[in-house]
Image (cartoon, grey):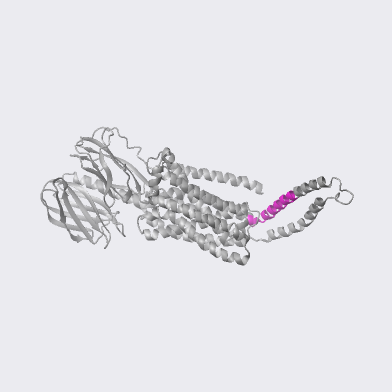
């Protein structure tokens, strides 16, 4: 029976790995987790005169390099001057050379979002009138190619290694302590440690090229590696390697000294290993939380511990499930029903924690019901929820088999083996002693004794093989145990696909960010249309993020009639979904940098929820005025965003 099942297991594993490879391949480049929400000049506009700089506004803070922002003339020549710099909040700019001729210019950007993912894109604007350009913007992506695929594979293997390492060790220590002396269990946990270590080193080497050029030749660039070590992601990977050194010590004690201790000593050592193992496992989980989704956005102080708990719950369930599968299929030592029941309780608790933390994470990353179907993140999350529901359903079947599982067949098999081994051992001893070893036959006794010794060893090996085969037959004779093996195998198959979907999900732009970017883009397009309609008014929309609670939104400034002299100014503050909301303070400053006039401070009065107004705002001279708005959302959280407007 075991010989029949083993090829099926291997075939199923190969098919599942192929499915995971397909998921990773079709995932494509890592989606942007910071989205471009605005620019000055705006995409596709035609300006009368060349701007002094090009500024870009993102949905969250990003990391810049010397070549992060580039502006190319119609012939593809770079016209930016100096390094890009942060203007305010999430707005970044690069200066341009003076005296730029008319034509179409291309702006390209490649930055790294606060949650460690590369973001790239391009757009065009024109000076005077549009023209033909030799610059192609269709290929502006980040995190793609061979390096991107390798990085995605490394992320998948790091998650898999963590789950097997933590879940397998927890299964041995908390559910089946006899497994500490079982060789397949040792190989499983050590294999998880090796996989996680190798994947972490691979990610560390790939990181510089992944967020930069994307070239395979840059993987071993020591300068890039040095830059990576100074980033948040590099620090997280190095911390993970240090924690893996502590995990190696934990494994050596668990599978070394632990199995050789007496029961009373083992009880004290179990407590120490449980405390130390929990600390190391939580630290490993935190190396993901401190550098990815949980470290940015809303409620990071809550999101990071929740993310750690989520990863530990996944490891406890799926890693323990993998260990149980290995114990059922590969271990010659039968797994007691008590151990299976203990794991069933651990798995139930892990599922409860997984659902609770998953609900919070879904709310935090989506923000609205429409994001479930309207964003790629939401669609992948629906797939993940479906797989988790399927996994819970199969787990319910496994729990039924666990309830019916009994050790009676195994115990009977052990007693039968003990009875059969007695004559077998006597026969082996008789053959080993030999009938020609008595007095009067000393000639050739040495050579004959050596032959008998070989014969005895051969018989012992044959007897061991027979005992092993008998033990497997006895183990497989229990229909409940066989049913449990099949249901656990099905659980493991679904878990492999679930892990692949989760890996792709962590590389996808959160639904909340995607919807905020769409709202900001729509508002920007609307303001562009209104300002070009010839009504005499100017409307400016600027996204802001103060970093605190309810710190994200869009501030809109209207000037009417936008000319020299007195003007009516209205300021509107809205959430990303378009709903007005109040904040403690709004201030506006006007600066005409070309004539060194300003800043002219304006403090509008509150009119209604999310609406402030100031009358008779004097604009002394026509020109390209910089409108800077300071938004304060709490006693300590504030930011200043700015945009230029042609007045007069």
Residue at 13 percent across and 56 percent down: it is 615
Residue 427 visible somewhere in the drawing: yes
Residue 498 visible somewhere in the drawing: no
Is the residue 327 above or below the residue 97 in the image?
Answer: below
Magenta region: 460-481
Prevailing secondary structure of the magenta residues: helix
Q: Looking at the image, which is closer to me, 430 or 497?
A: 430
Q: Tell me how many marks there are.
A: 0
Q: Is residue 311 left or right of residue 326?
A: left
Where residue 383 sits in the image (x, y, percent)? Answer: 45, 50
Where residue 280 sits in the image (x, y, percent)? Answer: 49, 58
Residue 402 falls within the magenta-colored stretch: no
Where residue 574 sits in the image (x, y, percent)? Answer: 26, 56
Where residue 305 sits in the image (x, y, percent)? Answer: 42, 60
Is the residue 153 above or below the residue 250 in the image?
Answer: above
Residue 478 falls within the magenta-colored stretch: yes
Q: Looking at the image, which is closer to me, 206 or 449?
A: 449
Is the residue 98 above or below the residue 474 in the image?
Answer: above
Residue at 25 percent across and 47 percent down: it is 524
Residue at the farthest right position: 440
Q: Is residue 307 left or right of residue 90?
A: right
């Amino acid at each position: 029976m075991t010989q029949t099942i083993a090829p099926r297991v291997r075939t199923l594993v190969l098919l599942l790995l192929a499915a995971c490879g397909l998921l990773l391949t079709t995932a494509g480049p890592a989606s942007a987790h910071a989205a471009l929400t605005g620019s000055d000049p705006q995409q596709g506009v035609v300006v009368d005169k060349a701007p002094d700089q090009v500024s870009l506004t993102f949905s969250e803070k990003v990391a810049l390099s010397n070549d992060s922002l580039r502006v190319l003339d119609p012939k593809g020549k770079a016209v930016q001057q100096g390094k890009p710099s942060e203007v305010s909040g999430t707005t970044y700019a690069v200066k341009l050379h003076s005296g730029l001729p008319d034509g179409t210019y291309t702006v390209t950007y490649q930055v790294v979002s606060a949650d460690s993912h590369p973001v790239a894109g391009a757009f065009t604007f024109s000076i005077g009138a549009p023209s033909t350009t030799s610059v192609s913007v269709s290929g502006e992506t980040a995190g793609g190619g061979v390096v991107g695929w390798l990085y995605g594979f490394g992320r998948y293997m790091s998650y898999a290694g963590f789950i097997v390492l933590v879940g397998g060790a927890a299964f041995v220590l908390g559910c089946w302590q006899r497994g500490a002396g079982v060789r397949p269990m040792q190989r499983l946990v050590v294999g998880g440690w090796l996989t996680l270590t190798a994947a972490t080193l691979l990610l560390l080497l790939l990181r510089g090229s992944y967020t930069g050029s994307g070239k395979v030749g840059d993987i071993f660039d020591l300068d890039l590696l040095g830059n990576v070590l100074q980033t948040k992601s590099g620090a997280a990977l190095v911390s993970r390697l240090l924690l893996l050194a502590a995990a190696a010590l934990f494994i050596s004690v668990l599978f070394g000294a632990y199995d050789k201790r007496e029961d009373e000593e083992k009880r004290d050592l179990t407590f120490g290993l449980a405390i130390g193992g929990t600390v190391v496992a939580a630290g490993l989980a935190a190396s993901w939380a401190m550098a990815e989704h949980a470290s940015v956005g809303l409620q990071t102080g809550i999101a990071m511990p929740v993310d750690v708990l989520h990863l530990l719950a996944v490891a406890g369930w799926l890693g323990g499930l993998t260990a149980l599968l290995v114990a059922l299929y590969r271990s010659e030592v039968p797994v007691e029903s008590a151990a299976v029941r203990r794991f069933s309780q651990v798995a139930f608790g892990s599922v409860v924690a997984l659902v609770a933390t998953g609900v919070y994470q879904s709310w935090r990353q989506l923000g609205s019901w429409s994001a479930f179907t309207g964003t790629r993140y939401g669609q992948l999350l629906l797939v993940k929820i479906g797989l988790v529901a399927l996994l819970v359903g199969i787990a319910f079947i496994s729990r039924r088999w666990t309830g019916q599982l009994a050790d009676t067949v195994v115990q009977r098999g052990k007693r039968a083996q003990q009875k059969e081994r007695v004559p077998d051992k006597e026969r082996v001893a008789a053959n080993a002693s030999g009938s020609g070893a008595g007095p009067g036959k000393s000639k050739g006794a040495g050579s004959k004794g050596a032959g008998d010794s070989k014969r005895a060893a051969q018989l012992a090996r044959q007897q061991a093989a027979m005992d092993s085969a008998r033990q497997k037959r006895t183990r497989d004779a229990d229909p409940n145990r066989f049913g449990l093996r099949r249901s656990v195998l099905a659980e493991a198959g679904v878990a492999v696909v679930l892990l692949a979907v989760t890996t792709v999900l962590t590389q996808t732009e959160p639904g909340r960010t995607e919807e905020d970017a769409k709202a900001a883009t729509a508002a920007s397009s609307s303001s562009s249309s209104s300002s070009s309609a010839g009504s005499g008014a100017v409307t400016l929309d600027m996204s802001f993020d103060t970093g605190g609670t309810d710190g994200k939104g869009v501030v809109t400034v209207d000037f009417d009639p936008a000319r020299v002299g007195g003007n009516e100014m209205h300021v509107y503050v809205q959430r990303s979904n378009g709903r007005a909301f109040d904040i403690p303070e709004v201030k506006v400053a006007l600066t005409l940098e070309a004539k060194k006039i300003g800043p002219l401070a304006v403090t509008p009065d509150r009119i209604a929820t999310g609406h402030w107004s100031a009358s008779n705002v004097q604009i002394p001279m026509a020109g390209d005025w910089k409108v800077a708005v300071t938004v304060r959302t709490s006693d300590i959280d504030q930011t200043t965003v700015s945009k230029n407007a042609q007045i007069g």
